[in-house]
Image (spheres, helix red, strand yellow):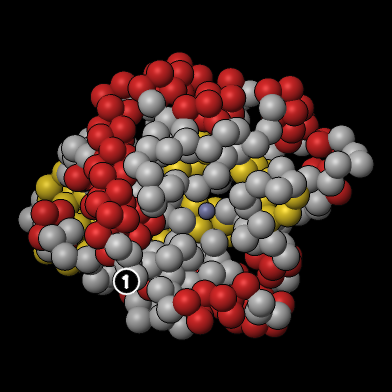
Amino acid sequence: MPSSFMNADGEQRVRVGWLIDGLGGPAQKDMVLVIRADRIASIEPWHPAQSMALDFSNATVLPPLMDAHVHLVFSGSVDPNVRSAQLEQSSVQAQAVIIKHLEQHWRYGVAAVRDGGDRDGAVLRCKQHKFLSAVAPVHVAATCWAWHVKGRYGKIVGRALPDNVSPAQALSLRREGIDHVKLMQSGINSIDRFGEQSRPQFGREELQALVAWAHDQMLPVMVHANGEAAVRLAVEAGCDSIEHGYFMGHDNLKRMADHGTVWVPTVMPMEAFAQAPGLTAAQRDVAHRTLEHQVDQISKAHQWGVTIALGTDAGGLGVDHGVSAWQELKLLMAAGLPLEVAIHCATANVANLMRLNRSGELLPGQVADFIVIPGSPGEALLELPQIQAMYLKGQRQNASTNL
Ligand SMILES: [Zn+2]
């Protein structure tokens, strides 16, 4: 922080047109963030007599977004040649792709991502080499690869649990350095038959053993699950988050509210899919109805008190890294969540799920991480936002991006 911005007490006062603090309450107009070193010392109403180090009076200030579900080794390209080449990329190629995608997140003000796995564990390897943080200081939570049942869906992002060892033993083989465990508990949504449900992958006892092992290691468990039976087993086994959760049904939403299970509804992939080239009219109709159904589930989840965390599944077909966090935010708002609540889902709820030491909230005592978007909240999100500035630990960032 240049010293000219600070007053004699080493404080920096930042005038803010609209402050969204990440707690979910309404934006506050004309506020001042007082920053001391890397933290927010206080938040006060603005007064004309005060001198300001920084003036963002025509802008909205909010915590950086976080994305609870990405696949950094894949791009959102809809070109089938690109998509199939991505499955064969070498570890050096994967490394370059991961860096590019982190830069994209950074450019769109996304400061933390939770990776949902790749079959070679490339993201974990990259994370273990410290160079990632030198490229773009996006926090990455990695899981090596996702685990699925042999012969079932999941090869694209993971590996089958070996059958000659117990599930817990299998997981412990890939434990070093991971931030969470990812399990595949269902298939993917059918694009030919609306609402078709795949049977669960893991049985009740197996799932309980996997979750218990992970929790013994202090590792949260994210579970890919669509459909009533798959979601129910995962919630009852005590998993930390349900990923996707399409067609899970109202009983599961209430069950998740009771258990405190977080839901990462990843609407964006279905939105992108509905627009993708090459679909028949019937498939496009299924995609649109599936999208509407998911938005309705989110609306119910919000009413019934389910904790929702924003996740995009970036890297999926048509889902680009970085920008998709804002697209997903708009889809949460389409389900009836007020802007500030949707931002709470994209900041504090993800931070809690990732067990970050930053809160994703702008409060006195918290680390001064924030982004600045021109205009009022309504204007700022009318179109996809241009990030005017990004601050981490009270320091303006520019890295190798346009920030
Ligand atoms: Zn995924």
Residue at 77% from the left image edge and 36% from the top image edge: 217
Residue marked by disc 1: 277
Residue at 60% from the left image edge and 38% from the top image edge: 185
Does 231 sit left or right of 171 as displayed?
Answer: left
Does 180 sit left or right of 212 as displayed?
Answer: left
Residue 100 visible? The answer is: no
Between residue 22 and residue 225, name the one nearer to us: 225
Residue at 82% from the left image edge and 36% from the top image edge: 168
The answer to whether the residue bearing label 1 lies less than 8 angstroms from the nearest atom of ligand 1 is no
Between residue 203 and residue 47, name the one nearer to us: 203
Residue type indicated by callout 1: Pro
Residue at 68% from the left image edge and 23% from the top image edge: 204
Residue 254's spot in the image, x, y percent? 39, 19
Crowdedness of circle 1 by 10 Å Cα count: few (<14), some, many (20+)?
Answer: few
Residue 234 visible? The answer is: yes
Does 365 sit left or right of 15 as displayed?
Answer: right
Q: Quadrant of the C terminus?
A: bottom left
Residue 369's spot in the image, x, y percent? 41, 56
Between residue 176 and residue 251, name the one nearer to us: 251
Find residue 84 and report its image quarter.
Answer: bottom right
Q: Give the residue at the far right of this rendering.
A: 164
Image position of 353 with respect to 252: above or below: below
Residue 387's spot in the image, x, y percent? 28, 69
Residue 253's spot in the image, x, y percent? 40, 24
Find residue 366 and report its image quarter.
Answer: top left
Image position of 61 with respect to 205: above or below: below
Element class at badge 1? loop
Image position of 61 with respect to 317: above or below: above
Q: Quadrant of the N terminus?
A: bottom left
Between residue 394 and residue 333, name the one nearer to us: 333
